Image (cartoon, helix red, strand yellow):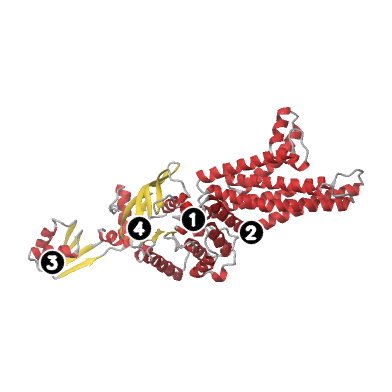
Amino acid sequence: MIELIGLTKRYGPTLAVDDLSFRVQPGKVTGFLGPNGAGKSTSMRMVLGLDRPTAGHALVDGRPYRELRAPLRVVGALLDAGAVHPRRSARDHLLALARSNGIARSRVEEVLGLVGLEAVAGRRAGAYSLGMRQRLGIAAALLGDPGIVLFDEPVNGLDPDGIRWVRQLTRDLAAEGRTVFVSSHLMSEMEDTADHLVVIGRGRLVADAPIGQVIASSSHTLVRVRTPEAAELGRLLAATAQTVRQESDSALTVVGLTTDDVGEVAHAGGIRLQELALQSASLEQAYMELSQHHLDYGTSQLTPQGA
Amino acid sequence: MTTTTLGRPVLLGRTLGAEWTKLRSVRSTYGGLLAAVVVTVGIAALAALAIVTDDQPNPAPATQLAAVGASLGQFGLVALAALAITGEFATGSIRTTLAATPARWAVLTAKAAVVGAVTFPAGLVATALATLAASAILGIGTDGILAVSARSAAALTLTSLLVVGLGAVLRSAAGTITTAVAVLFAPPILGALVSNDIVATVMDYLPAGLTTVLVGGTGERYSPEVAALLLGAWAVGALAVGVVGLDRRDP
């Protein structure tokens, strides 16, 4: 588990990360979303004990990262395309990392095979494409077989094959019970991968909720109802729904209720339904709305889940 | 969990292994070593040739010419030491290093140790070869070759460690090498221009003055052994400031 507690980072007058608190749970993929410059990378660097927080702290498996003596066995991280010396070969890069954490040399060849770089492992990393450097960075992250992985924008520079591979890898790692924390500024990337979302904007927490809840809570998620008694049903629904719009004599759109809720109300009121349909927002729509709301009001729409 | 109870010796041993792997796997290491040997031997040989050509009576001992060669050849080792640490900042690989080994003291100690492990033999070989070359050209003996080579290697090694510390503080290769050149060359020039007792005393305790006594084997204010200790103190001080810098400033 990764835990951020009031994490704050100030660069001069700029508050890059502002009192950020959330937990990343094992066994699922947690997407870390926010526009470029929202503070995702800075937060991740603070979790890794690289950048010093101005206030607050971060814990991995209950301990500050800097206290770990063999951290690669606990947390594997991919940061800015691996941060590799360009004149060193991929194999030597991984070998140095393995030795630093007492990891067997044979594991270097294993992870090279895992990311598909074994054929080019002797070439210097500077000659690699961005996609190959991402693969090398992922190999380094997996070197210590860690229970927590932290990937900062892992699909940057990858071709469609590589993107599919990273998606599958993150799903597999979570299925093995690991804590998987993946940042992206692309919502579409998270739709198929993440189970849980942490959304930040301007360094502040915007949402921390299961992906389904993020989508369900969007005003773009609505229920369409067709009934001969639209006006009557609208009156009944208005008591509990967020918004009810009467589209015509026989059609309503309802925001803030599920199809089950609408069905119950109609049944209780003895109203005959001809159609009851859910129209889900896309993650993109939900995210845009969250960000917009956050910019307008500076508050969270979705409250963090209790432990 | 075993990961927190790991003892310091084991941690340092692992970090040494990692730093050694890194140092041996970049070409700049070999370039620095080669430059140090070639320049040291070349300068000593050129000086000997000049003496032979001028047909000077009572030529300087071969070891003294080798020491002159080493004073210039040391910049190959200065570059090696500077790049070993600043290269990590330039490429961003310092973040990978510190994520793998969060103990900053272990990283810098291991880096200094592996740099020292290559600069000492390089200094020894370069100075000995330079002495042999000069003596062959001059047709004189190689008296004191072992002692001078060892003292020269010690001075070169301690200077390299000082540069590793400087590099951890300054973080840029250009800044570190420029500062190292200034520290090693400016004081003797200044000392020659200013005849003031206080200035002269201060100069003698700066790395350049200490190196002169250590390599030369005699000193007015202190012995070569004390010079080695004081030069070592400079190196340890620079490394300590480097560790604090790594700890306090974001990489």
Whether pointer 3 and pointer 1 mark residues with C-beta atoms closer than 8 Å, the reply is: no
The image position of residue A189, as x and y in percent, is 38, 64
The answer to whether any part of residue B91 appears in the image is: no
Residue of label 1 = A70
Specify the farthest residue to the left.
A270
What is the chain identity of the residue bearing mark 1? A
Q: Is residue B44 above or below residue A284?
A: above
Mark 1, Cα crowd under 10 Å, few <14 / some 14-19 / many 20+, is many
> What residue does disc 4 label?
A25
Mark 3 belongs to which subunit? A
Q: Which residue is mark 2?
A: B24
Q: Quarter of the image containing the N terminus of chain B? A: bottom left
Classify residue A245 by image quadrant: bottom left
**Residue under disc 4 on the same chain as residue under disc 2:** no
Q: Quadrant of residue A220?
A: bottom left
Q: Chain of mark 2?
A: B
What x and y, as percent, mark residue B20?
61, 56
Instruction: Read off the residue under disc 3.
Output: A250
Whether residue A71 sits left or right of residue B49 in the image: it is: left
Q: Earlier in the sequence, mark 4 or mark 3?
A: 4
Image coordinates for residue A154, horizontal then vertical, percent: 45, 62
Q: Residue at x 78, y 46 (%)?
A: B148
Name the chain under label 4.
A
What is the three-letter code of the residue carrying label 2? Arg
